[in-house]
Amino acid sequence: MRARQLIQDQSLYTYAKFEHDLMALHAEHPIFSIDKIGTSIQGKSIYEIVIGDGDQSIHLNGSMHAHESITTNVLMRFLADYIDAYENNESINHINARSMYNQIKFSIVPLVNPDGVDLINQGLPQSKSLKNDVLSINQYSHQFAGWKANIRGVDLNNQFPAHWEIEQQRKPKQPSPRDFPGFEPLTEPEAIAIYELTINKQFDRVLAFHTQGEVIYWGYEGLEPPESEQIANYYGHVSGYEPIQFVDSHAGYKDWFIQTFKRPGFTVELGSGVNPLPISDLNKFYPQALSIILANMEV
């Protein structure tokens, strides 16, 4: 069975459905590896997929924010399309999949924040104490559409040691559905998993997929290397998205990567509208996301 037929991406992912699809893909198409890089607060595995055998190491991640789980759909669809093209010696758009396999080693973490994603797409946790904590953080509302954080009310993309203290001063001081950077950097297991993976793998380039805005953020404090602008402009050319060098934000994954490694790092904001974007938008912006990923073969 073709890989694309094995993924159930017509609805937003829960952790259980994501894990099922990932294992089904691997069972039938074992051209990629799966590594557990960490565990969420609720004990859910955080998986890294590695595919390709090239010298260039590129990391992609999605669903760092709970209400952006459509980015998991994007990365799973890319994985399936890539597998099908590789096994059939086909091209995706105009990029030959086997050439890409030989040039790039992709590290993909499609679901960074499984607990937060399940809160939005499945409902409150079963644990009574955790359920009470979540409701308290959410001011006892059962509406979770605006929830960005992990299940403990910490915004994972405000957890990285890149001027974290600036975000601490101007963001919420207690657990919150969004924007609380934690009491210290790297307190949350999900952020630690991505941090340690990046330290261990020393990626050449990283792309963190978020929603929404149709923009590509590519700079941080002027620490980005000169080639970042060229890469971002090419991403913009193939996708129609707007490259933006600086934004008044700190403590994000892309920020920390650029600060630490002085290598190209990007935050890609897919689609437009109000988060969470409906699954019906996936077909609208998947071509743009795919074009950005494939552009790594050309720039």
Image: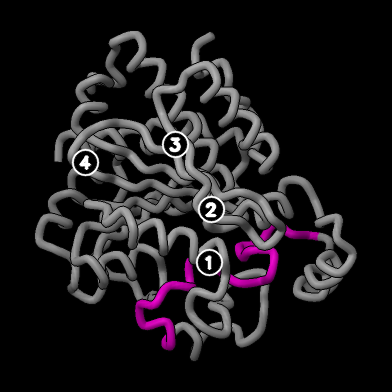
Q: Are marks 2 and 1 in contact (CB under 8 Å)?
A: yes
Is the residue 26 above or below the residue 207 in the image? above
Q: Viewer-nearest of labels 1 and 3?
A: 1
Q: Which region of the structure is painted magenta?
A: 143-166
**Residue corresponding to mark 4:** 237
Q: Residue at x 63, y 36 (%)?
A: 19
Determine the secondary structure under disc 2: loop
Q: Secondary structure at mark 1?
A: helix
Tell me which numbered mark, 2 or 1, is placed earlier along the sequence.
2
The residue that label 1 is drawn on is 156
Q: Dot 2: within a 10 Å radius of its alpha carbon, few (fewer than 14), some, or many (20 or more) residues?
A: many
Which residue shows up at 36% across the image and 32% down it? 51
Query: Mark 1 belongs to which amino acid?
Result: Leu
Q: Is residue 159 magenta?
A: yes
SS for tag 4?
helix
User: Which residue is label 3 attached to?
Assistant: 285
How far separated are the C-alphas under marks 2 and 1? Answer: 9 Å
Label 4 – label 3 distance at C-alpha: 15 Å
Q: Return the x and y of residue 228 as percentages of the image width and height.
A: 17, 56
What amino acid does circle 2 point to?
A: Val
Amino acid found under the numbered disc labelled 3 = Phe
Q: Is residue 278 left or right of residue 56?
A: right
Query: Residue 213's mark?
Result: none
Disc 4 to disc 2, C-alpha distance: 28 Å
What amino acid is at disc 4?
His
**Looking at this view, is 74 or 36 the one in front?**
36
Q: Quadrant of the C terminus?
A: top left
| SS state under label 3 | helix
Q: Quadrant of the N terminus?
A: top right
Earlier sequence position, callout 4 versus callout 2: 2
134 is higher (above) or lower (below) than 83: below
